[in-house]
Image: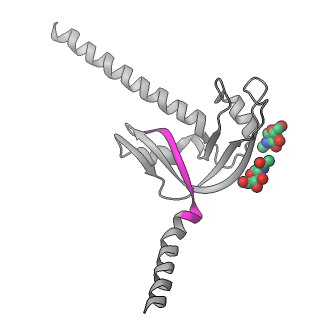
Amino acid sequence: MTSASCFFLIVAFCASFSFIQCQNYNKFKDKHIVEDQAQINCNITIKDRQINKDSCRFRNTFIHDTNGRKIRELCSPYVRSTLVPSDSALALTDCKLLKSRSSSPSSGCSYNQTEVKGVVYVTCENQLPVHFERFELSFAVHCTPCLWTLSLFILFRYLF
Ligand SMILES: *[C@@H]1O[C@H](CO)[C@@H](O)[C@H](O)[C@H]1NC(C)=O
Ligand SMILES: *[C@@H]1O[C@H](CO)[C@@H](O)[C@H](O)[C@H]1NC(C)=O
């Protein structure tokens, strides 16, 4: 193989690789990113974005982050890393499937939704978010350490 064809092979490989990366990010964006202040309806947004395939998705969380700006910034230092937490609580709309036997993507999937604030954990690949892992309510994030301290304090008071 000439060095020129080798060069083009590498370029093609890199191009397809970054194409796959963009695809993954676009999928992530479709599934999890909505505008900052948007009032969304899970039933409609999940249907419009074709998030359900053969069966109704059990749960889906949307992050209110216009153009995914905050989440992309969060991933910017990482080549590959799982469970990257956001450094602050973000506005989220959490959609949970309402249990009903008839529900299917063709008949329409029905969701119960809650607006919460939480720290999100995402997988980053090549500076882009590609997977939403989970979120923790900001109450839990902020209060777990102080609850631990408080219970240790009470325990010590009790023992000594
Ligand atoms: C989604 O649809 C179900 C069933 O029609 C309804 O009970 C529920 O309130 C809807 N959710 C929203 C957010 O409108
Ligand atoms: C929807 O979620 C809220 C909050 O978690 C809950 O209180 C309510 O009972 C749920 N509604 C239905 C129909 O499941």
Instruction: Indicate whether residue 85 is drawn in magenta.
Output: no
Query: Where's residue 31, x and y in %?
Result: 59, 35
Of the 4 image quadrants, the one containing the C terminus is: bottom left
Identify the residue at image location x=68%, y=49%: 37
Q: Nearer the viewer, residue 134 or 8?
A: 134
Specify whether 52 is left or right of 29: right
Identify the residue at image location x=79%, y=25%: 107
Of the 4 image quadrants, the one containing the N terminus is: top left
Identify the residue at image location x=77%, y=29%: 108
Query: Where's residue 69, x and y in %?
Result: 52, 45
Q: Residue furthest front?
A: 159
Q: In this figure, what is the number of numbered marks?
A: 0
Above/below status of 82 relative to 151: above
Above/below status of 152 relative to 88: below
Start-end of magenta stretch: 128-140
Q: Main secondary structure of the magenta part?
A: strand
Identify the residue at image location x=74%, y=32%: 109
Task: Name the quadrant containing residue 10.
Answer: top left
